[in-house]
Image: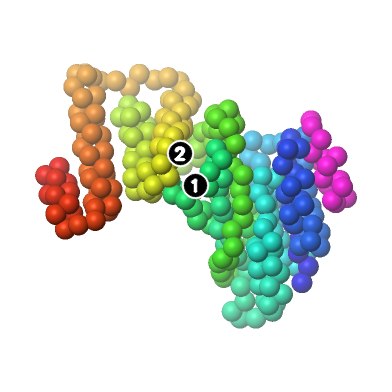
Amino acid sequence: MKISVILATYNEEKNIKDCLESVKDLADEIVIVDGTSTDKTVEIASRYTKKIFIRENPLMFHKNKQYAIEKATGDWILYLDADERVTPELREEILRVTKGQKPKTKDQINGFWIPRKNIIFGKWIHYTGWWPDYQLRLFRRGKAFLPCKSVHEQPQLTGKANYLENPLVHYNYQNISQFVQKLNNLYTENDKNVFLSEGKKINWQDAVRFPSSEFLKRFFLQEGYKDGFHGLILSIFQAFSSFVTFTKIWEKNGFTEMSSNDFLSKIEKEAKKISKEFKYWLLTAKLSQANNFFKKFYYRLRRKLIL
């Protein structure tokens, strides 16, 4: 069983060498679609493969990933981003499961979900929605494709999938500027377009509901507080991303006036609602960490009084 490793790249000279080094003993073929990089990405990549295709760098960069999938010739395809690394343990697991799969059987596995270990601002993020962050990255050729509708999408797989144990290592955001740049240029643009394509509408309350809901989800429901200060910062960033998405939708709608009569009173009502939700989730978090009966009873009682 041959394995093709595919990547879509753009100005990845700082990442591409380490990525390709991590798969050089795994891949029977490496396919790279480069979005007309202006740095040394292609020069470095050419040391590892001759199968490099140069194309435009679309905002929907999954188009280049899908093109790379179509150019692969291996029995199995592993698709990566340049800031990801395949560990020796993951490499051995991939070799084991692909060699153990017999083609054209009734119950054959056509794909594998791989956990992804996100390193953000120098720390492995265990919570805040970043772990285990399963990605469908390994699949039989011809059994999966990218719809190219959202940058958050997973490949669409025909047939059954299973899960691997060893994670990809993802050297995600390394500095604040990188986070803000991707937030502004990529993710909020994508989220805006997806929102509008689905025919959804916004109202002025969403200006506070979008970011507050995202923060509560990240920091409390997804236990971002267990990641400490990193979890707090990332929860705030994700809330800000939701706010920027809202404002871009508003901009697309022509900056329409959405306030109403008695605006301040309605803002006050929204603020009270958010405060109530915050207290509820704060007490829920404290309840989960309480280590004796009396503390648990106290937090349950306080939480019940909020409802």
Say which residue label 1 marks: 125
Numbered mark located on residue 282 in the image: none
Quarter of the view holding residue 182: top right
Front residue of 200 and 290: 290
Q: Is residue 288 left or right of residue 50?
A: left
Which region of the structure is painted magenta?
38-55
In the picture of the structure, the residue carrying the numbered disc 2 is: 230
| Vertical order, 211 against 9 (above or below) | above
Question: Mark 2 and mark 1 in contact (Cβ < 8 Å)?
Answer: yes
Residue drawn at (65%, 81%) of the image: 105
Looking at the image, residue 192 lies above or below residue 256: below
Q: Amino acid at mark 2?
A: His
Mark 1 packing: few (<14 Cα in 10 Å), some, or many (20+)? many
Q: Is residue 117 visible?
A: yes
Q: Is 171 or 238 nearer to us in this picture?
A: 171
> Marks 1/2: CA distance?
8 Å
Q: Residues within 10 Å of mark 2 (few under 14, many from 20)?
A: some
Q: Residue 68: x, y in percent?
A: 75, 51
The residue under the point 58% across, 66% down is 164
Residue 95 place in picture, x, y as percent: 71, 69
